[in-house]
Amino acid sequence: MLVLLFSPHTLPDKPLYDYLKPMANKLTENCTTEVQLDKIIKGQERKFRWRDDWPTMEKELQESGAAAIAAHNEARKTTTTSSE
């Protein structure tokens, strides 16, 4: 008989996604283009679309991905400007 003493679905007072937020940042931290971001989101959707909080997860991925892309573009702009 298998007995689970801890299940992530029964964590008290917090939605499960609050425990997974760092995942979005980790997945998108090296994201440099919209195409990469779309592939990341589609891959995660295949795994998690069945969950009630998938729309929240998708939104978090979009936001962290957009921030990573903006940071990459800004760093690239600064590097290009300083090398001239």
Image (cartoon, rainbow, N blue to C red):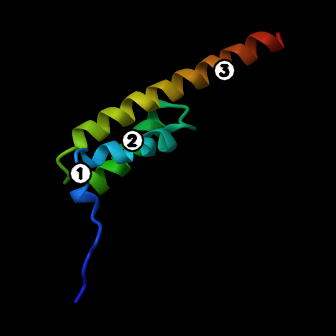
Q: In which quarter of the image is the N terminus?
A: bottom left
| SS category of the residue bearing label 3 | helix
Report the residue marked by disc 1: 12
Q: Which residue is drawn at 48% across and 25% down?
A: 67
| SS category of the residue bearing label 1 | loop
Report the residue marked by disc 2: 21
Depth check, front residue: 9 or 55: 9
- Is residue 3 depicted above or below 34 in this figure? below
Q: Residue at x 37, y 31 (%)?
A: 62
Depth check, front residue: 28 or 18: 18
Cα separation between marks 3 and 1: 41 Å
- Is residue 62 depicted above or below 9 in this figure? above
Residue 60, x across and y down, in percent: 35, 34
Q: Which residue is drawn at 22% across and 45% down?
A: 13
Give the class, few, some or many, for how many residues have Cα within 10 Å of label 2's Cα (few <14, many ≥20): some
Look at label 3 and name its amino acid.
Ala
Residue 11, x across and y down, in percent: 26, 54
Look at label 2 and name its amino acid.
Lys
The answer to the question of whether label 2 and label 3 lie on touching residues, with beta carbons closer than 8 A, is no
Look at label 1 and name its amino acid.
Pro
In the figure, is residue 11 to the left or right of 65? left
Report the residue marked by disc 3: 75
